[in-house]
Amino acid sequence: MKILLFSHGKQTTGDAELYLLDLIKGIKQARGESWEIYVVFPSRGELWEQVHQYLSGYSFIRQPWWLVRPSKNRLRKRILFLLEKPFTVYKIRRYIRRIKPDIAITNTLATPIGALAAQAENTPHYWLIHEVPELARNLVYLFDKEWSMRIVDLLSQKIIVASDFMGEYYTKRLHSDEKIAVVYQPLNVLPMRQPEANQPFTLGMLGNFESNKGQHIAVEALREVIKEYPETHLLLIGDNNSHYAQEVKERIKEYDLDRNISIVEYSILHPHDYLIQANAVLVCSRFESYGRIIIEALKCGLPVIAPNKPFAQEFIKEGYNGYLYTRDDVAELAWKIIDLQQADLDKMKENALLSVKDQFPGQAFAEEFISTINPTES
């Protein structure tokens, strides 16, 4: 069996890329050399560095996106997409003809180029969707949303998502709801760490600095928390060079919170080595397709404070293994952080582990995915 995967990202900081990383490793472990895996990357990066050893081949082809950042230049971006599309489809078609894959899989909703090329070469295509633009609000459709969804439907044998919430969401929006399949991503148990003596209460927050992740909300809430617990510390893991990151840093300086907030770049190879230095985990995302960081935190034995949204409601039980709050309500978040410091933290850590015990096993992931795209192999 030969499969061709299309990746829109080159780093390993996003849920989609981490899913792809686990998928490639899982298939090779489950099927060995009997399955050949090829990937089209946009360029070299951390993702390529971590998976190329498992691949039978790869190519670097940047695909234009039909999901873009909100801006006033939508018409210009449409024109650029339409100009780039034929040439990129042609390049991918040439690659498909060379490797002759049995199946093609696009690992994002961000671009339809791989799907279009696969259709032109009569290669069965599957779509792995990790995004819900209208909920995250960090991306918008370049063309009409309903039209885009029809294209996704038409160009897919199946549409695979990583959570029940995503499955329900897209089932309501696609004409062929029988195409939807949910395949949860595996999560390995991470090492627990005993807090250091005299360590202040520390909240860890892992995520690329962007408005959807809500680092600014965490900073605003901490400003209120330290009025009652002045030693509270916030560890922000995911720094980058974006304008948003600079705004967050300026806000930290303005509020004189440098002593209470530490920032770590996201270029570190194992960000969880930093996360497990915390006593609990904070999530401030507007939207996540899959509560990966929540599950990882619980598997580390760390209580989680997260927005009262479907991706968190699925895993967090109020007062048992964490707390839920209204996403943009800074005052409520501050009180939840205070409540956690006043709770029996050891008991909540124990509950965190119990709440995800025996869930999301890695060994079943590849087999479930394989049976979804190729039932004869199951």
Image: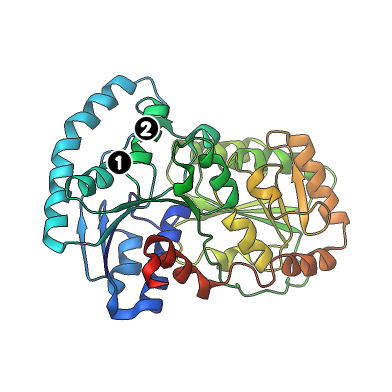
Q: Which mark is residue 148?
A: 2
Specify few, some or many for label 1: CA neighbours under 10 Å numbering under 14, 14-19, or 20 or more.
many
Disc 2 marks a residue whose amino acid type is: Ser
The answer to whether residue 87 is left or right of residue 198 is left
Res. 204 image quadrant: bottom right
The front one of 246 and 39 is: 39
Q: Quadrant of the N terminus?
A: bottom left
Say which residue label 1 marks: 112
Residue at figure coordinates x 42%, y 28% from the top left: 146
* Residue at 18% in and 45% down: 120
Asked which secondary structure carries label 1, the reply is loop
In-front residue for pair 5/243:
5
Give coordinates of residue 303: x percent, y percent: 74, 60
Location of the C terminus (image quadrant): bottom left
Amino acid, disc 1: Pro
Residue sitting at 41 percent across and 56 percent down? 17
Q: In this view, does 24 lie to the left or right of 182?
A: left
Find numbered disc 2 in the image and state the secondary structure of the residue it sits on. helix
Q: Position of residue 111 (x, y in %)?
A: 32, 41
Q: Is residue 94 above or below residue 154?
A: below
Say if residue 14 shows up in the picture.
Answer: no
**Horizontal side of residue 256 vs 67, given as left or right:** right
